[in-house]
Amino acid sequence: MGNATISLLAFIAAISILVAVHEFGHYIIGRWSGMKVLRFSIGFGKPIWMRAAGEDKTEYCVSAIPLGGYVRFLDSREGPVDSADTGRAFDHRPIPARIAVLLAGPAFNFIFAVLAYWILFAGGIMALKPAVGEVTPGSYADQAGLQFGDKIVAVGDVETKDWESTLVAIIDNMVVDGRVPLTLESDDGRQRAAVINVGDDSARLTEPGLLFEGLGFDVMQPPAEVGSLTAGGAAEAAGLMVGDRIVSVDGQPTRTFSELVAVVSTRPNQEVAIEFVRDGVTAKVDLVLGERNVDGEKRGLLGIGSSPVTSDYYYRRTFTPLQSLNEAAIKTWTSTIFTVRMLGRMLTGDVSIKNISGPINIGQIAGESAQRGATYFLSFLAIVSISLGVLNLLPIPILDGGQIVYQVIELIKGSPMTERAQILGQQVGIFALLLLMSFAFYNDIARILG
């Protein structure tokens, strides 16, 4: 199965799951509030499967276009209401009940994220310690005095235990005034303060994939050390041993295992000179690389595996079930706040609008996470679920947030907004969404074209 097919199927699965969660929130709170539900649909367009059930004969269906969904309540604004259903229409229920129904969709997305993270944390998680890799000469990081191997103890007032929290803190500080205050710890255990100052370049550095390149340092990763040997492989045949640290291939430095893979993969069946260190002694050996096929493309193969993760780079966090739930709630809350901040800073120009992703990019990420395993896909679902919850709370008329604004206005003025005002609001909302979608599609195409 090709990558495009996997991405498409993973995207459809992700959207279907998250829309079902969102719409179920509207549905169940509506039922509990005494509203009559006419239809619960996953997808738009013509139903390809339908079943009527319950006293109200609610239609449960899966529709042809799997890019959303909806719950349709009985509503007197759409037609006459039978006398037997008096008081059960959406617009006949008390305003607090309507607001609760509208809030329920995003709320269930946040609840889903908490449950997803709870499952992930319950099994324990491996985290990469935040440490500085190679520093680019003359870069912002170099000017700030960062050195290879420095551990990042804190960013501003935020203690950093893993790269995820470190990244969030770096971006948060950088977009405020262009400065990233760091507390660093060198190999000898001494701590010092450093400040990366990017000035007015902060917005550009928030573009996808530009942060580390722009700041001028890499993430410290496990070294290019032989952790295992493939029987009959090129490395074994050349006499390399477990524990050897490969420092270069044909003179090209390989400080990390990922750099080694990148260099080797471009040289299938080629003779190369491998420089390595064994027991403190540097040696060199010539060998002919093997090859492997990846999506129809030949790539070089050395025939080694990476070293098992060590406490120098990774650490494992374990939790009790209650601690897992607490960590999941904190993770969901901090991710939500970060998403809101990013959206706000996009509006002010402090963060690049290139961070807005459309269905193509989301589909690619969905496919990649699905191929990496269930835990990665579940983490992806949690992140997208939070984004879906936040976006639906925006005060745009055709979204839940906009409808809540309508209900609040009706509560204040004692009567519904005029039909003309509501139509105007819908038009403004559609224009805003089209504009947002245009940016998203443009960014997707730009990423594809490089």
Image (cartoon, helix red, strand yellow):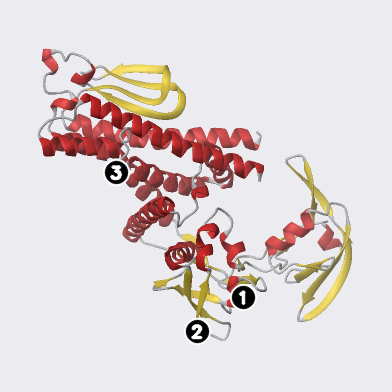
Residues at circles 3 and 1 in contact by the CB criterion of under 8 Å: no
Mark before the other along the chain sequence, 2 or 3: 3
User: What secondary structure is marked by label 1?
Assistant: helix
Q: Residue at x 17, y 37 (%)?
A: 409
Decide which of tag 3 and tag 1 comes sooner along the chain. 3
Position of residue 66 relative to residue 10, above or below, is: above
How far apart are the two marked residues, 3 and 1, measured between alpha carbons?
44 Å
Q: Is residue 356 left or right of residue 252?
A: left
Q: Quadrant of residue 6?
A: top right
Q: Which residue is mark 1?
A: 142
User: Which mark is nearer the camera, 1 or 2?
Assistant: 1
Residue at 46 percent of width and 24 percent of height: 65
Where on the picture, by quarter, is residue 427?
top left
Amino acid beneath label 3: Ala
Check disc 3 and report the residue beneath it.
107
Mark 3 is surrounded, within 10 Å at the Cα level, by few (under 14), some (14 to 19) or many (20 or more) other residues, namely: many
Please state which amino acid type lies under the numbered disc 2: Gln
Q: Which residue is mark 2?
A: 191
In three-dimensional space, the C-alpha distance between marks 1 and 2, rounded to whole angstroms, equals: 17 Å
Q: Amino acid at mark 1?
A: Asp
Which badge, 1 or 2, comes first in the chain's sequence? 1
Q: Mark 2 Cα within 10 Å, few/some/many (few <14, many 20+)?
A: some
Q: Secondary structure beneath disc 3?
A: helix
- Residue 103: x %, y % from top left: 25, 40
Cα separation, mark 2 vs mark 3, equals 43 Å
Q: Quadrant of the N terminus?
A: top right
Residue 445: horizontal and vertical position, in percent?
60, 39
